[in-house]
Amino acid sequence: MNKIPNSLHASDIAHSMHPYTNMRAHESQGPMIITRGDGVHVYDSEGKEYIEGLAGLWSVAVGFSEQRLVDAATKQMMALPYYHSFAHKAHEPSIRLAEKLVEMSPEGLNRVFFTNSGSEANDTVVKMVWFLNNALGRPEKKKFLARTKGYHGITIASGSLTGLPANHTDFDLPAIPVRHLTCPHHWKWAHDGETEAEFTARLLKEAEDVILEEGPETIAAFIGEPVMGAGGVMTPPEGYWAGITALCEKYDILLVSDEVINGFGRLGTPFGCQKFGFTPDIMVTSKQLTSSYMPLAAILVNDKVYNAIADHTAKLGTFGHGFTGSGHPVACAVGLENLKIIEEKDLMGNAARLAPQFQEGLRKFADHPLVGEVRGVGLIAGLELAKDRATRTSFTPAGKVSAQVAKFAAEEGLICRNVYETVALCPPLIVTSEDIDKILARLGRALDRGWDWVQAEGLV
């Protein structure tokens, strides 16, 4: 293998601006340059092999070397490399993919709108909901309910829905009307002595109180990830989603399920809403839709939402929204083939079968001196690091220790992601039992090294 020349590192430092990065730190640290992938593994410019324990960014279901997706893209490139979907234009890949998504989604979600990313999709959801309520003569019904620690993207609208400080600070967000409710994470946010059932009841009361305080006539939609991802992999307490669904029905509030991370088998079910027994009015998908081989996202809506929007486009003459790449033919062709692979190889079943080994193996770290809580479902999990488990006290500043553990993990040959105080894992759906054993072993060594480092630094 030919190594990447040092000039490429220098060029990256000189010219590239990286997302979610301390840019001044990057100038001295430089990049880890990934050169190729093979199955669950990726390789850096020095030839070092890693298990990609976060599936890229929660997204590469079929692994990093699926030739069928390369072939699907090549075939479509040769036939029709690009066309748009504006003004009654269409092409077969987007038609077939929309049909497939409706077929595999919860009943009632019958219409599909394509965008390039989850952020654009949730931004579009905001515009759709506003458009719909204007169409229905309810111009005041524009506010969203979201959650602290929720993640819905980084455009102005979707970034406003997101409930993470780094996405708001000095970006002047939130910039749309949104109320962020308490994060549904019992271990961190419960009151002392509060049971999970009591915690759920308190959160549902808070949600209803906010609805009544703001006025139900002003609340347009509730948006949430079935399992919260980028905020730290938080699983909902028992009864939470049933209660939220009931409130949305009671007060005529649209329910939006953000399935960008949860969707296409991550939890062992096609979609996260099915795992927790609710059916949304709007569902947002991306990431594993194409295994991120191509950028693509899809919004699915029910007939109630579609008909209100469609009727208004007839009145106005158009739906004045869309992107050059909406339903890009190459991305849609890749998405179709990707979903075929997920079904043919039973990767959703693989996630369900391997979930016990993955989750139980990680929970063996629950007594590790660095770990406050282990949580997760299916093939997604988070280990929250804590200075004091008993008092749920975090290390400060947030992310310092988890970043060090993620660094040690990389040195051990495992790529994971530190999100605030949490070390997150989300391996490709093609992962094997043997791969999981290696993930657990490498993570264990990283935690041990992290504990030694924390003691040496005098942080405990």
Image (cartoon, helix red, strand yellow):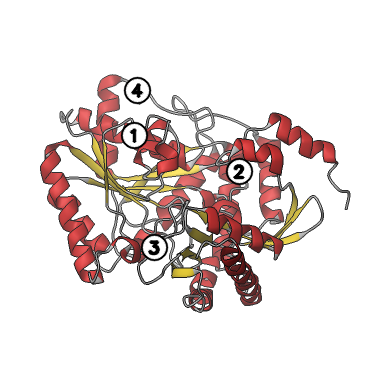
Residue at position x 77%, y 39% in the image: 9
Looking at the image, residue 75 lies above or below residue 406: above
| Label placed on residue 268 | none
Dots 1, 2 in contact, CB < 8 A: no
Residue position marked by numbered label 4 in the rendering:
318
Look at discs 3 and 2 and give the one toward the viewer: 3
State which tag comes first along the sequence, 1 or 3.
1
Instruction: Find numbered disc 4 in the image and state the secondary structure of the residue it sits on.
Output: loop
Q: Dot 3: within a 10 Å radius of its alpha carbon, few (fewer than 14), some, or many (20 or more) residues? A: few
- Horizontal placement of 82 versus 180: left or right? right
Looking at the image, residue 155 lies above or below residue 110: above
Residue position marked by numbered label 3 in the rendering:
393
Residue 344 position, x and y percent, is 58, 65
Q: Residue furthest right?
A: 2
Q: Gap in Å between the C-alphas at discs 1 and 2?
A: 29 Å
Residue type at numbered disc 1: Pro
Q: Gap in Å between the C-alphas at discs 1 and 4?
A: 29 Å
